[in-house]
């Protein structure tokens, strides 16, 4: 954007050679002053000169740029266009919204492309926002690896199961096996604690079911969008709850921005990216996921001018001081309208403004008038109003569509289709997991039976051993008796009763023969002792009985 010449206060988005000037433009003005009208006019001019228009966000959830599909209705707007000789017109518009089960089933709405986001397209920036970390943490590493490895048929549940498998590692027959997708290592990646974190990140997408498989007709065709100059492409999130789903909304906007940059080589035309109320997404001193939005917006704005066939960003905000500092610093053209309070003091200090410029910002003489903050000298520029309808406070977009006779449709069938898709995937994995659990149970039962069988075999072996021992003991006792009897046999000659002769008789050596005889003698001694004790006890009992009788 430049001043056309020294004599006229007229701004142009073309240079002296007729080339479009691509740069980030920020429009600032208090509520109701006309910053939205100013932005719409700038975007309209870029569109007229051949740019593709993409409205990336709708922070107020009013489908603000959707009204471009209608001719102006407000009296002040029509009177102005008539006065300056601009013909009212309406733009062709395409509306986009991530699929969510929040879409009312019974109501009718204009044509929306309810889109899904392939899990395989998500990169480090999107997952980093969900995990709220710039570093490649275990969780982000797992999410990235799963995104790169899933098949075209893998949906959300398969994605989570893939991560769980990566954490557990490849296991066969209760043993880890080499994973050749990970250099053949046998260890799992990450911990079950990381899996718990990841399922927490992904839980909102069960309700807002737009994270999906790659093989679906509901995904966005970026090549087609980026080369469709005929329509305004307006991405909204108004079926999501701003108070509950703010992080999910931030994730969606970052994905859209990253997708544009990833597909910039598909552009055949220059592009304008529009972000209304940028402060709502990237406030001053952002925290949590908003830090990631601010960081990536700043990075994108710094390189946007030379990207693709040339890109321009048109942003607006009610409050300059409330916007992230890094984003403010990267802006090339800041259009300041009416300001108040701290904003007036802050911009005055930053740009060391003269008194007349400060007075203009306090009380602009004309509505829809702005000055360029970066200019050293003071000039006032009054912008034309857009030729198509502007979002007025009393308007409601879907209500306006009904009023204007826009063809409406019910999305009951789409909601049922997505429910069935989720249910089919869930049932598929329930069966798969049940089969796996049954196989594990069966394997455990086999192991149990095997152990019991081994136990039975061991018990039978022990029983046989005991019998053999018992038999051996009996045989040993017989041999002891035979040796003893031969040793004490009075009919034999003394020379025939030596230990050596006895050993030769029974096939044992003389030392063993001697031990057998001594062992048997001990047994006889114990038995005689036991018999003697029994006899004594018996006599005692008998004596006691006789005494009692007397």
Image: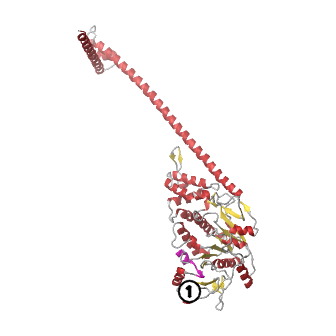
Q: Position of residue 433 (x, y in %)?
A: 58, 46
Given residues 359 and 265, the one toward you in this image is: 359
Q: Position of residue 161 (x, y in %)?
A: 57, 52
Colour convention = secondary structure
Residue 57's quadrant in the figure?
Answer: bottom right
Q: Position of residue 128 (x, y in %)?
A: 54, 64
Q: Residue at x 53, y 69 (%)?
A: 291
Q: Residue at x 33, y 19 (%)?
A: 508
Please state, as top left, top right, bottom left or bottom right, where the C terminus lies in the image.
top left
The reply to whether residue 450 is visible in this rendering is: yes
Q: Residue at x 52, y 76 (%)?
A: 325
Please state, as top left, top right, bottom left or bottom right, where the N terminus lies in the image.
bottom right
Q: Which residue is mark 1?
A: 358
Given residues 335 and 176, the one toward you in this image is: 335
Q: Is residue 351 left or right of residue 260?
A: left
Given residues 319 and 465, the one toward you in this image is: 319
Region of the chain picked out in magenta, as a range: 324-338
Residue lying farthest to the top in this orientation: 491
Residue 301's quadrant in the figure?
Answer: bottom right
How many badges with numbers are in the image? 1
Assign a secondary structure to mark 1. Answer: helix
Would residue 332 be counted in the magenta stretch? Answer: yes
Image height of 14 relative to 213, above or below: below
Image height of 498 relative to 177, above or below: above
Counting other residues with Cα less than 10 Å from the Cα at mark 1, is it few (<14), some (14-19), or many (20 or more)?
some
Q: Position of residue 357 (x, y in %)?
A: 57, 87
Image height of 18 relative to 490, above or below: below
The reply to whether residue 226 is visible in this rendering is: no
Would residue 242 be counted in the magenta stretch? Answer: no
Image height of 231 relative to 21, above or below: above
């Amino acid at each position: 954007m430049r001043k056309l010449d020294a004599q006229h206060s007229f701004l142009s988005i073309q240079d002296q050679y007729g080339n479009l000037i691509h740069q980030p433009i920020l429009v600032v003005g208090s509520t109701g002053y006309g910053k939205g009208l100013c932005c719409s006019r700038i975007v309209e001019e870029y569109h007229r000169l051949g740019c593709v228009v993409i409205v990336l966000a709708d922070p107020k959830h009013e489908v603000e740029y959707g009204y471009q599909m209608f001719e102006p209705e407000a009296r002040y707007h029509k009177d102005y266009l008539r006065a300056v000789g601009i013909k009212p017109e309406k733009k062709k518009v395409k509306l986009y919204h991530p699929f969510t089960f929040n879409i009312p089933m019974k109501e009718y709405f204009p044509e929306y492309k309810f889109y899904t986001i392939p899990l395989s397209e998500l990169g480090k920036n999107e997952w980093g926002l969900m995990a709220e970390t710039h570093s490649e943490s275990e969780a982000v590493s797992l999410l990235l690896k799963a995104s790169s490895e899933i098949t075209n048929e893998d949906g959300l549940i398969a994605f989570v199961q893939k991560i769980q498998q990566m954490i557990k590692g490849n296991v066969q027959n209760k043993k880890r096996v080499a994973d050749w997708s990970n250099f053949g290592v046998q260890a799992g990646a990450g911990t079950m604690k990381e899996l718990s974190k990841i399922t927490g990140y992904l839980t909102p997408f069960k309700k807002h079911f737009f994270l999906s498989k790659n093989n679906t007709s509901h995904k966005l065709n970026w090549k087609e969008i980026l080369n469709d100059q005929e329509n305004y492409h307006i991405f909204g999130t108004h079926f999501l709850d701003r108070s509950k789903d703010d992080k999910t909304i931030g994730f969606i906007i970052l994905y859209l921005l990253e997708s544009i940059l990833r597909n910039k080589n598909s552009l055949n035309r220059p592009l304008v990216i529009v972000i209304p109320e940028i402060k709502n997404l990237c406030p001053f001193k952002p925290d949590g996921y908003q830090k990631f939005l601010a960081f990536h917006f700043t990075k994108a704005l710094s390189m946007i001018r030379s990207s693709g066939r040339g890109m321009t960003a048109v942003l607006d905000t009610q409050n300059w001081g409330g916007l992230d500092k890094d984003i403010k610093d990267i802006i090339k053209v800041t259009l300041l309208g009416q300001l108040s309070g701290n904003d007036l003091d802050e911009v005055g200090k930053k740009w060391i403004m003269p008194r007349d410029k400060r007075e203009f910002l306090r009380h602009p003489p004309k509505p829809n008038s702005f000055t360029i903050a970066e200019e050293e000298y003071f000039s006032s520029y009054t912008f034309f109003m857009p030729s198509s309808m502007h979002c007025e406070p009393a308007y409601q977009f879907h209500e306006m569509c009904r009023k204007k006779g826009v063809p409406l449709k019910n999305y009951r069938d789409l909601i049922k289709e997505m429910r069935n898709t989720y249910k089919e995937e869930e049932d598929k994995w329930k069966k798969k997991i049940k089969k796996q659990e049954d196989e594990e149970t069966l394997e455990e039962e086999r192991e149990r039976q095997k152990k019991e069988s081994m136990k039975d075999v061991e018990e039978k072996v022990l029983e046989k051993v005991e019998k053999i021992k018992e038999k051996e003991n009996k045989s040993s006792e017989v041999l002891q008796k035979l040796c003893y009897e031969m040793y004490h046999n009075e009919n034999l000659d003394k020379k025939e009763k030596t230990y050596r002769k006895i050993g030769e008789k029974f096939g044992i050596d003389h030392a063993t023969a001697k031990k057998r005889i001594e062992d048997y003698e001990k047994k006889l001694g114990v038995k005689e002792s036991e018999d003697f004790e029994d006899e004594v006890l018996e006599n005692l009992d008998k004596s006691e009985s006789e005494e009692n009788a007397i």
